[in-house]
Amino acid sequence: MATSTDSTQNQTELDYMKDSYLFDSQAVVRQCETVDGGKFQITLDRTIFHPQGGGQPYDVGTISNDDAVFNVNEVRMNPQGIVIHTGEYEHGTLAPGQTVNLHVDEARRRLNCRLHSAGHLLDVAVRNAELSLVPGKGYHFIDAPYVEYDGKIEPALRESSLNRIQIELKKLLTIPFPVKVIFENTDNGDPITYSVKRQVSIADGYTCPCGGTHVHNIRDIGNVEVTKLRVQGPKTRISYKLETN
């Protein structure tokens, strides 16, 4: 929808970066467009919808006012930092300039927060297990979450390493550590957009750059099981799963 001429002034303000448990909010419509397949795309001045990226799935939910309901079933961010909400109208239509109500599916968001925080806590467990692995990409989706690390573990040490990681992870999960968010290159009151650098502190002495949503406290993750350790070339992939009941 947007072009390369968009400046940082046009970037969507990312309210989910300030509070992962913000499920309802308001915004102003900037653009509404029809795309192939009978779908529509909407951009807003601000959003609580997390776009897919950083190893985390997108949010779903609704954008509405008294005259229309728009079901959001896909959310992406373009290279210019503008969040694009794709979906279909349940009834009515929206127009630029209108103030709308935003609602994010709470159950999906909370699950995504737990999955993402668990992935970063796995990084801490790997560090505490004194393994020479450097965190790389993460896949924090419910179907098969994992974190991929630079570095490899020799075959004879893989089973014991997996056990050590699980032990360290269980220790971390007993500590009710409040997750902290730090914005690096902005003053208080400045809009939080894609251009703002954010750090997340997920355990004592551990901070990493992250733009995703997280639990407010580590105790909210629940039980996590490390399920598999696989080495492929110079990388090690460690899989995990949440207790979802």
Image (cartoon, rainbow, N blue to C red):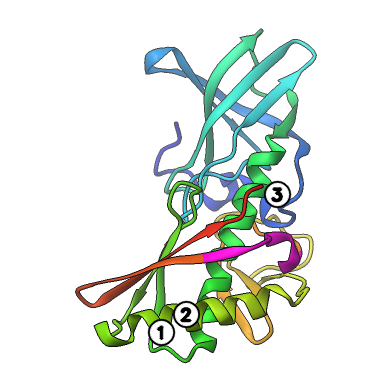
Residue at the spot x=65%, y=45% of the render? 109
Residue with the mark numbered 1: 160
Image quadrant where one finds the N terminus:
top left
Q: Quadrant of residue 73?
A: top right
Where does residue 59 sit, x and y in percent of width and height? Answer: 59, 39
Numbered disc 1: secondary structure? helix
**Could you tell me the amino acid type at mark 3?**
Asp
Residue 69 drawn above or below residue 181: above
**Residue, far top:** 92
Please say whether residue 224 is one of the residues in the magenta stretch. Answer: yes
- Residue occupying image coordinates x 49% and y 45%: 52
Residue 24: in sight, yes or no? yes
Characterize the local packing of mark 2: few (<14), some (14-19) or many (20 or more) Cα atoms within 10 angstroms.
some
Q: Which mark is residue 163?
A: 2
User: Mark 2–mark 1 contact, CB under 8 Å?
Assistant: yes
Residue 19 percent coordinates (x, y): 74, 54
Q: Is residue 187 left or right of residue 9?
A: right
Q: CA distance from mark 2 to mark 1?
A: 5 Å
Q: Residues within 10 Å of mark 3 (few under 14, many from 20)?
A: some
Picture coordinates of residue 108 (x, y %)? 63, 41
